[in-house]
Amino acid sequence: MTENAALTPDLQAAGWSASDDGTAITKTFQFRGFRDAMAWMARAAFEAEHLNHHPEWSNVYNRVEVRLTTHDTGGLTGKDISLAERMEKIAGRTLAK
Amino acid sequence: MTENAALTPDLQAAGWSASDDGTAITKTFQFRGFRDAMAWMARAAFEAEHLNHHPEWSNVYNRVEVRLTTHDTGGLTGKDISLAERMEKIAGRTLAK
Amino acid sequence: MTENAALTPDLQAAGWSASDDGTAITKTFQFRGFRDAMAWMARAAFEAEHLNHHPEWSNVYNRVEVRLTTHDTGGLTGKDISLAERMEKIAGRTLAK
Amino acid sequence: MTENAALTPDLQAAGWSASDDGTAITKTFQFRGFRDAMAWMARAAFEAEHLNHHPEWSNVYNRVEVRLTTHDTGGLTGKDISLAERMEKIAGRTLAK
């Protein structure tokens, strides 16, 4: 999980991009409004805790800009990819089953 | 908003039922797990605050049982119907737009 | 963690009580209002996930009634005591350090 | 509420500072960890909704950097001061009463 990793095609297709030096990936999520943005952050925070890997993220109204990198290794690792994939999953499906 | 109201066909179809005396409506929501249940409660709480009308609700793992009534009037009002409709909407759509 | 446990004097002093058969402990927390109750639940949910042990809890406006038991063993275990202690800690201190 | 306003001595003492041009105020809040940071954001989000005035804020682990400005007027208004005061209040007191 702490070895170097690269942005996957699926994440790229979903709007994630790598920084020039390849040490981080970013995406700006858009929600219907502030309330949905907050609920998504609350939901994604559980995944961050589960992976023990935390995002750098900022919110302005209905947008959440996420930046993922692994500070320990100074690069991109499987943890970043996992968290990005989980964030996508949560954003794109309903809460109720 | 504070006049008496009745369960709508749409809410009934969605699984809401009225108490025997018609003064409250209830539904048990099911989520994929605890995390989704919590995120939905966080999201629904904004609607409760917006309407200034608060649910009686309980959670056990992936379930949230909701009971709505209007204490001021001792019955069911438009506020209960509005909150139920918003809860449905939030549960059944994705967070990202 | 899955062996039987008993309510501690500290938790008892904080308002927790055991069910008649000793298989569960309960407390009703009171907050300043709905918003604080929700924030506390959001905070406590992280502890529940961390312990992989989830409460039965219900909320009405500024109150959250909690019931803790260990379904696997049908009794009270160290996990219930741990979660109760963490819930107390979170309720009684400030968020900012 | 939409007239120009200035940073109060109380907010300044609490660590808020104004941007050079006086159109925004900022503070970096520190929490015990990620979980507390998230719970505080969840709590503060209710105040933002109540005031219908939303922060620009970013989180990295136990820190939340907040920037408040009023986009409609391009300056600092009473809404920014109100939200800052509420954020302080929430950060510095316990959730349970």
Image (spheres, coloured by chain):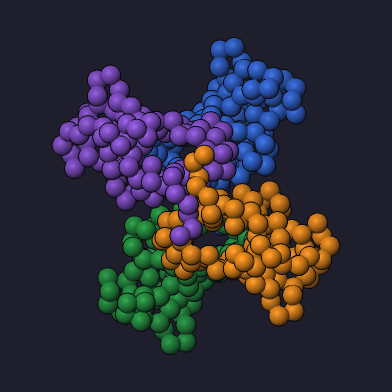
Chain colours: A purple, B orange, C green, D blue
D70 left or right of A67?
right
Residue B30 or D12: which is nearer the viewer? B30
Question: Residue at horizontal 43%, vertical 66%?
Answer: B61
A82 left or right of C86?
left
Asked if residue D63 is positioned above or below residue C9 in the image, the reply reads above
What percent of the width, then of the height, locates residue B6?
A: 76, 67
Question: Residue at horizontal 19%, vertical 42%?
Answer: A1
Q: How many marks?
A: 0
What percent of the width, then of the height, locates residue D92?
A: 54, 43
Question: Residue at horizontal 53%, vertical 54%?
Answer: B92
What percent of the width, then of the height, locates residue D55?
A: 57, 32
Q: For residue B58, what is the image quadrant? A: bottom right
Q: Quadrant of the C terminus of chain A?
A: bottom left
Residue with the most extreme top position: D21
Q: Is residue B55 visible in the rendered structure shown here?
A: yes
Asked if residue A10 is positioned above or below residue B50 in the image, the reply reads above
Question: Residue at horizontal 62%, vertical 17%?
Answer: D23
B66 left or right of A6?
right
